Image (tube, rainbow, N blue to C red):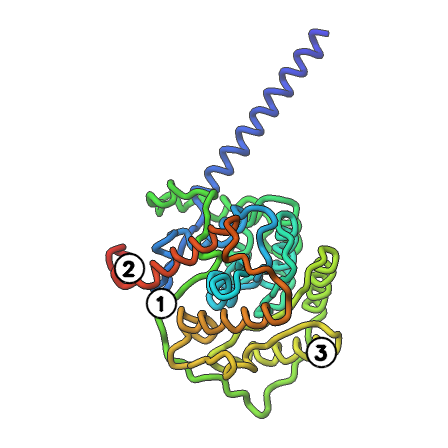
Amino acid sequence: MEKRQSTKIILLKILAFVIGLCLMMNRLTTLLMLKEYPVGANVNILLNPYILGEKPTGFYSLEDDTLDVVFLGSSNVHCNINPNIIWNQYGITSYDFTGDQQDLGTTYYYLQQVFKTQSPKLVMIDILNGGAQESLANDQAHFSYDYMKNDMSKVLGIWNRTKGSRLEMYFPIITYHDRWKELTQRDYTYSKDFHNSLNGAFIYMVQNEQPGVQLPEDMPVENLSNKTIKWVQSIQALCEKNNCQCVFIKTPFSQYKEDYFPYFAAFGEYCQENNIQFIDMNNYADAIGIDYATDFVDEMHMNWIGQQKLSNYIGDIISGNYEFEDKRNNSEFSQWNDDYDTMMYYINNFDVLYSESGV
């Protein structure tokens, strides 16, 4: 009897040690992880300096079952689509649940997390990166998974999408252990409990004139890869299981890129042949009202001017093809009105606030 009691005490001590070690490692990892990197003048830095973690963290802080629409994909989504604009025009709740360089394979695992807490009627997924590669590059993998909530979807996503760097993705401290020399006060004050007033959007306040999209007559012909097809089918099946409509999109570019446009064309052809909804917004630049001289930061990221135009255009598509309640006068959703007002305060006073911030 005494031997059993002694064994039990030893096991409890081991368990307590393991739990303590895990908690300590989690705290150290959070402290050391990269939270920001230099980009052009933007509104987000005034609201929250942790630009790498703000989009997923904000999603996880939302109340359950409050989103009508979820946008997924890479920076082509959060730089180009603004949920607050769609809210202000139509009273539709949405969020950019995205990550820099997010590919369709990673989007599948993000989408799994969406359906654990939300019940959107529609998801719109940008196809910039089709997930054709066997394993993500390290930087791309960290952008995608560092701030993803720890659950089985993250475990499976890392296992299937980061085959060349699984260990450091499961234990990011391996990558960031030497960042202690670079730590600032912001690293110590970072919190995962964060409301994102921009609902995932990233707002650039700079503009760089672009040449516009001119497709060559001899544009290369490309076949859609089997891996991309696999992710498209998996995403569709997951949406069907959760009674959710799925629309694949490509947000506009500001110039022709041979690395991308043949793939966009192949994706569109596959969708047409298989009755899959896909909107390549490069084909609707005039309808959107795009001005390549004023609306972009670079070849694929819009600024505040372009973001407004595209968001209104997408809002028109959503409101015209799907039935959503206008919640702008619903007191249960008053936070969305507050979010819009907060955003516009920083937009309208950006020059002064940005100058005073010392960024």
Contact? badges 2 and 1 (CB < 8 Å) = yes
Whether residue 158 is visible, yes or no, is: no
Foreground residue among 5 and 266: 266
The residue tagged 3 is 272
Q: Which mark is residue 64?
A: none
Residue 334 image offset from top left, x and y in percent: 47, 51
Q: CA distance from mark 2 to mark 1?
A: 10 Å
Secondary structure of residue under mark 2: helix
Whether residue 210 is visible, yes or no, is: yes
| Amino acid identity at mark 3 | Gln
Q: Is residue 205 left or right of residue 329?
A: left
| Amino acid identity at mark 1 | Met
Q: Earlier in the sequence, mark 1 or mark 3?
A: 1
| Residue depicted at 69% across the width and 60% down the height | 244
Secondary structure of residue under mark 3: helix
Quadrant position of residue 204? bottom left
Contact? badges 1 and 3 (CB < 8 Å) = no
Graded by Cα atoms within 10 Å as few (under 14), some (14 to 19) or many (20 or more), the crowding at tag 1 reads some
| Residue depicted at 68% across the width and 11% down the height | 5
Relative vertical location of residue 216 with respect to residue 7 in this rendering, above or below: below
Contact? badges 2 and 3 (CB < 8 Å) = no
Residue 26 image offset from top left, x and y in percent: 51, 38
| Amino acid identity at mark 2 | Tyr
Q: Earlier in the sequence, mark 2 or mark 1?
A: 1
Q: Which mark is residue 205?
A: 1
The C terminus lies in quadrant: bottom left
| Residue depicted at 52% across the width and 64% down the height | 90
Secondary structure of residue under mark 1: loop
Q: Which mark is residue 354?
A: 2
Q: CA distance from mark 2 to mark 3?
A: 46 Å
